[in-house]
Image (spheres, helix red, strand yellow):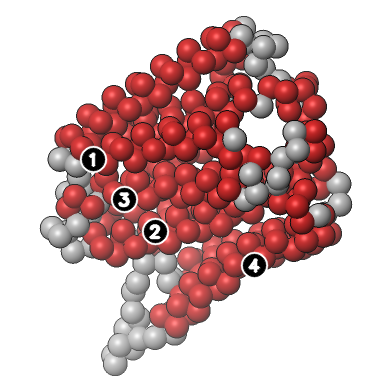
Amino acid sequence: MAIINFIKLIRPLNLVIIILLQCIIKIFLIDQFIVNSALSNLDFFLFLFSTVAITAAGYIINDIYDEKIDEINKENSRIINKKIKSSSAIACYIILNASAFISIFYVAWTIKKPIFSLIFLYSIYALWQYSKQLKVKFLRGNIIVSWLVALSIINLALFDILPIIGNENSSRIIFKIIICYSIFSFLITLSREIIKDVEDLEGDKILNANTVILKFGFDKTKKFINFLNTLVFILIFFWQYFQYSIHQSSFENNQKIEIWGTDTISIIYTIIVQLFLILLIFKSHVAKSKSDFSFLSKLSKTIMIIGIISIIVFTKNFI
């Protein structure tokens, strides 16, 4: 029973999503276009383990600091000091972070970039600071979480591509593509974090948290959420314009120009992503209840997943 409660504590579904996102980028983007990337299979496994372990530790420390607020917002699902003692949770937190840092230091040393391990040390510190105090600071907590999600994607490019970026012809463009996906993930996550603040409004009031919803009010917060969602929509629209331009272009002999992500199926897939975003924008505009914002949170996560899965679609139809 204790193991089951521990698994619930570290949000296994979210960890699985992280694993899938990293594997998609590694297998269907980096490995498809870069012959000799920096990370070996063992190195990538340790990199993945470190990322997941630090994230799991972040969930643990967050729930430890959130014990009182969870008594209000999530009493039925609360775990700390209800199903698992806080002392046991702290021990797990330390073990996960220590093993993660040892693993990533080995990987960084292997690729001759030991200083890169400090990025993961920073992530541990940032998650602790977020859980301790930043989450109740106006926008700072939301931005930190969103940045760390984006950083988890950028890290793979730093570890796997940057050490060999001068030796592989495709390395620079693949690095830029990964940066674009990290920006997409940052904006979607930031929107979702503010949506979650609306869900947790009652508990945040008691803690006197300075969240966006408590500072701006309900209507302005919804407008801010949709401002972020619209930014994502516009960025994807620019990509769609590029897709359409390339799709309509050809060489003098009428041979089509082939560029990753610009074939017909990729164009249709991008339109589907945009339709999900339009739904998110509309639902955000009309949202009124806690259940509405719970739906928006799930929809935001879905959009991020299908957005990353586009890598598989674009690569499979290009090769």
Tell me the residue that label 1 is attached to: 115
Q: Residue at x 15, y 40 (%)?
A: 112
- Residue 36 % position (x, y): 17, 49
Given the image, on which type of amino acid does mark 1 rest? Answer: Ile
Q: Nearer the viewer, residue 187 or 296?
A: 187
What residue type is disc 4 on?
A: Thr
Q: How far apart are the two marked residues, 3 and 1, measured between alpha carbons?
A: 15 Å
Residues at badges 3 and 4 in contact (C-beta under 8 Å)? no
- Does the image show residue 192? no
At x 39%, y 41%, the residue is 23
Categorize mark 1 by other alpha carbons within 10 Å: few (<14), some (14-19), many (20+).
few
Earlier sequence position, callout 4 versus callout 1: 1
**Comparing labels 3 and 1, the label whose residue is closer to the camera:** 1
Instruction: Find disc 2 in the rendering and name its residue.
Output: 179
Depicted 239 relative to depicted 145: above or below: below
Residue type for callout 3: Ala
Residue 230 circle label = 4
Q: Position of residue 4 (x, y in %)?
A: 59, 13
Tag 3 secondary structure:
helix
Q: In the displayed structure, would residue 142 be above or below residue 17?
A: below
State which tag comes first along the sequence, 3 or 2.
3
In the picture of the structure, the residue carrying the numbered disc 3 is: 157
| Cα–Cα span, label 4 and label 1 | 37 Å
